[in-house]
Amino acid sequence: MPAPRTVLLTGAAGGLGTLMRSLLPEYGYTLRLFDVRPIEDAPEAITADLTDKEALREAVRGVDAVLHLAGISLEAPFEKILRSNIEGTYNLYEAARLEGVPRIVFASSNHAVGFTPAPRAGTPLDPSALIPIDTPHRPDTFYGLSKCFGEDLAQLYWDKHGLETVSVRIGSCFPEPTGVRMLSVWMSPADGARLFHAALTAEEVGHTVVHGSSANTRLWWDLTSARALGYEPQDDSEPYAEKLIAEQGELDPENPAHSHLGGHFVSDPPIWPY
């Protein structure tokens, strides 16, 4: 696929969206920003909710692709998840279909498969022990359930309408890992930009699901489908391991928050504050 020139970035005021606002233009993208919250340094950004179908239709008009990061990113009552993550994602796909947008990169999550048992702790893992990309959906929360819906919606829109999607099951994208579990699923912001760029430009993706993380020494999941897009991760969480383990201890296989891919989302999920 030729490199998109203009990309709609939804969720542009969020944590990940803010990181990508600064990193993706280095790849030559012009970003059109969309968020329910105003973005102070971008007065031209579209301030609207995912339930606003007219605003979404206007936002996607004329763009070459969409990077969809918007929505609730923690657990919340089902009614809120339904409105933002399920109905909102449908509204985006329908707007993109109507306006002829050829590709969406969808921010899925490890929480779509959060109840999947984590591989054993330690470094490094045998490649045969890595969680495969075709592991069945096992959501750990209503939030994770909404990401399962998003992946299935993407498949439907590819099969029925020819709208391509790369669904990225993001681990944790922060400037540095903040916990021992995160050592296995961390994606540096720079690698996040590399992966999104690969997802935006790879040829003939149909609907492709990939794991989103750096090339961590303690990696839990298989990055083969991400690498097939042209993604070449450059970072590793291991330089942070000694300090985090000294502060927090090693993972306990008897602790459900340590023994499942979704971490504490399986037992005590953080709640969306808004």
Image (cartoon, rainbow, N blue to C red):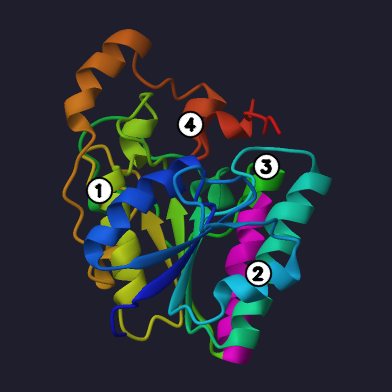
Asked whether 45 or 8 is in front, the reply is 45
Q: Which mark is in front, 4 or 2?
A: 2
Residue that badge 2 annotates: 56
- What kind of residue is marked 3? Thr
Boundaries of the magenta span:
145-161
Q: Residue at x 24, y 15 (%)?
A: 243
Give the prevailing secondary structure in the magenta stretch: helix
Numbered disc in front, either 2 or 3: 2
**SS of the residue at dot 1?**
helix
Q: CA distance from mark 1 to mark 2?
A: 28 Å
Quadrant of the frame with the N terminus: bottom left
Which numbered circle lies on residue 259? 4
The amino acid at mark 1 is: Ala
- Cβ–Cβ below 8 Å for labels 4 and 1? no
Sequence order check, earlier mark of 3 and 4: 3
Q: Of the residues under marks 4 and 1, which one precedes in the sequence?
A: 1
